[in-house]
Amino acid sequence: MLHLIQAQGGFDYSMIIMIVLMFAIVYFFMIRPQRKRQKEIDNFRKSLTVGSKVVTASGVYGTVKSLNEGEPYLTIEVSKGVNIQIDRNYVYADTSQQVRQ
């Protein structure tokens, strides 16, 4: 068996190194930044207060009117007197104010 491996050119470590390198590239350029973004979003959702400016996943801008503690949703005012209830997982920080300034 050893004779066959030597006849074929020996065990090629470059393939293992290439696989490890590809995994490292995927981790540092895709997985790690996504985890960081998700952690920031989770921290924002935990720190929500009444009056926070938010945007929903569907693009509706509004202001938090009620957090409904213990419930999976919160109440957002999208216009004077128009309130909607939306799942907390679909609420993001309103960054449009930062862009305009």
Image (cartoon, rainbow, N blue to C red):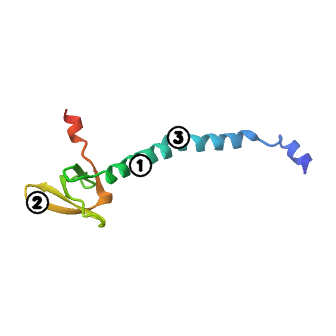
Q: Could you say where residue 50 lies in the image, as x and y percent from the top left?
A: 21, 53
Q: Going from the N terminus, do you reach mark 1 or mark 3 first?
A: 3
Amino acid residing under circle 2: Val
Label count reads: 3
Helix, strand or loop under label 1? helix
Circle 3 is placed at which residue position? 28
Q: Could you say where residue 13 lies in the image, as x and y percent from the top left?
A: 75, 40
**Vertical position of residue 86 compared to residue 96: above or below:** below
Quadrant of residue 19 within the rendered picture: top right
Amino acid residing under circle 1: Lys
Please rate how many residues cluster around mark 2, counting C-alpha atoms within 10 Å: few if below 14, some from 14 to 19, many from 20. Answer: few
Circle 1 is placed at which residue position? 39
Alpha carbon separation for disc pair 1 and 2:
31 Å
- Identify the residue at horizontal 58%, vertical 41% (top origin): 24
Relative to residue 47, is residue 62 drawn left or right? left
Relative to residue 3, is residue 57 drawn left or right? left
- Identify the residue at horizontal 22%, vertical 41% (top origin): 96
Helix, strand or loop under label 2? strand
The disc placed on residue 82 is 2
Whether tag 1 and tag 3 are in contact, CB under 8 A, the answer is: no
Query: Quadrant of the image for the C terminus?
Result: top left
Helix, strand or loop under label 3? helix
The disc placed on residue 31 is none
Alpha carbon separation for disc pair 1 and 3:
16 Å
Amino acid residing under circle 3: Phe
